[in-house]
Image (cartoon, rainbow, N blue to C red):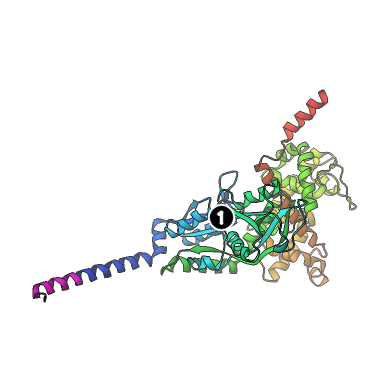
Amino acid sequence: MQATRTQRHSLFSLFVGSLLIFLLSACQADKVDQHQLERIQERGSLRVGTMMSPVNYYLAADHSGTGFEYELFRSFADSLNVDLDIVVRYELRELWQLLEAGEVDFLAAGLDVTDSRRRIFRFSPPYHHVEQKLVYRQDSRDRPRDWSQVDGRIRVVTGSSHEGLLNRLSEQYPELEWSSTPLYDADELLDHVMRGEIDFTIADSHHLDIKRRAYPDLSIAFTVRDDTPLAWAFPGGTDDSLYAAAIEFIGASHESGLLVQLVDRYFGHVAKFNVVDTRAFIAATENILPDYRDLFEEYAGEFDWRLLAALSYQESHWNPWARSPTGVRGMMMLTLPTAEQLGVRSRLDPQQSIRGGADYLHRLHRRLPDRIQEPDRTWMALAAYNVGLGHLEDARVITQRQGGNPDYWIDVRERLPLLRQKQYYRTTRFGFARGDEPVRYVENIRRYFDTLVWLDEQDRLPNGESEAIVRQEQIAQ
């Protein structure tokens, strides 16, 4: 049956109306999709999905945010002139669900880029590269050299790239005994290895470096994946506004040196690991530090007392009678002229030595140019404690001559060893210096300090006052 003219007109009107509605909806959807960055700026906040961990984001003692990822995405928010809205999840799969549902603008959680993830999400250029390691507890077994020698239980985090790797390896090594869990994060799995609850786990190198400050018996069997890129994850789609801004920010961060500074601040000093030294230090925190903790707290001033304690351990291993061939003595290893300037009558008296060393560090800190910001200012003051303010200034001059930033510790650190070379020290005011020594010196102090902070936050650091009371009671008995 043929349709009447009226029917044809009605059908045509309906088709046109539907087409207009479709086009209008498409335009509106396109308008919404194409202006994600504008919406972020209009609401005044950037929504970032992350996970709490020592390398991503955590709250310091004063409840302020800290962590490598946090510093980076906070700087990104600052570049957009918006506030941060941090959305924390405790499982990786929940984090990906947030992104798929549009509840966050992007993910920043130390995520490595894999082919399977690329098929769903977009990733920024890498801002850092790590290695993935198979980890076990030293002395618990013979070290396996490759997957064919792995004999024991492996556990990794559900939804991690480590799980995907083990899935693929299972085809080649069907005898591998492994499982994944959503109940624990990567940091907790390292704890399980230490307690013998599992035999192996896979850890990213920067995370492992931080963990080994307090657990030196965590050992590396072999590298599972080398040169692994870490990047931010964005949803798929046609909207490139925020994605393009992130690409531009990461490129600028590479160029400005921000990324190099952040990597150095959080990971640069922990990569050089010495198991014997770390064990000795942890033992000293239990057996020696309680006797002097109150003095470090009393004289720390504007510094964290744990930094002053770390400095003292580097100088003397908390030995009040320490003496070097050059004549420096005591807990803080003061020279005789410096001690006299500081009013220290006996360098072998712990109270006087700690007070004098703290005073000296404060003076060096204050004498540095005001434009040097933290934490670079503290690292340079520590270097000056070791090599002298004059030699530090010489290294800063060389840094500026070579196009580096004399106010950045990472740039000055690179030039300090040049003070050993005649072609450089002959042009300086104070001449030759063993400039490599303050570099190692500062790195050691930073490692000791980080370990003290971690032990203190875990309530594993004995309190000096309570320990003293126990000793007095034992003597009385």
Residue at (31, 68) in percent of width and height: 26
Left or right: residue 67 compared with residue 148:
left
User: Could one spot residue 296 in this view of the protein?
Assistant: yes
Q: Which residue lies furthest to the front in this view?
A: 175
- Chief SS of the magenta region: helix
x 66%, y 48%: residue: 192
Q: Is residue 14 magenta?
A: yes
Amino acid type at circle 1 is Thr
Q: Is residue 158 magenta?
A: no
Please tell me how crowded label 1 is: few (under 14), some (14-19), or many (20+) other residues with Cα within 10 Å: some
Q: Is residue 82 visible?
A: no
Q: In this view, does 371 lie to the left or right of 463?
A: left
Q: Quadrant of the C terminus?
A: top right
Q: Position of residue 255 (x, y in %)?
A: 59, 69
Image quarter where the N terminus lies is: bottom left
**Is 464 situated above or below 411?**
above
> Which portion, as a residue range, is magenta?
1-15
Residue positioned 61% across, 65% down in the render: 171
- Under circle 1, the secondary element is loop
Foreground of the two, 65 or 282: 282
Depth check: give the residue in front, 167 or 123. 167
* Number of numbered labels in the structure image: 1
**Image coordinates for residue 289, horizontal then vertical, percent:** 77, 40
Left or right, residue 468 beside residue 5: right
Pick whichever, 78 or 384, lies toward us: 78
| Residue placed under numbered mark 1 in the picture | 158
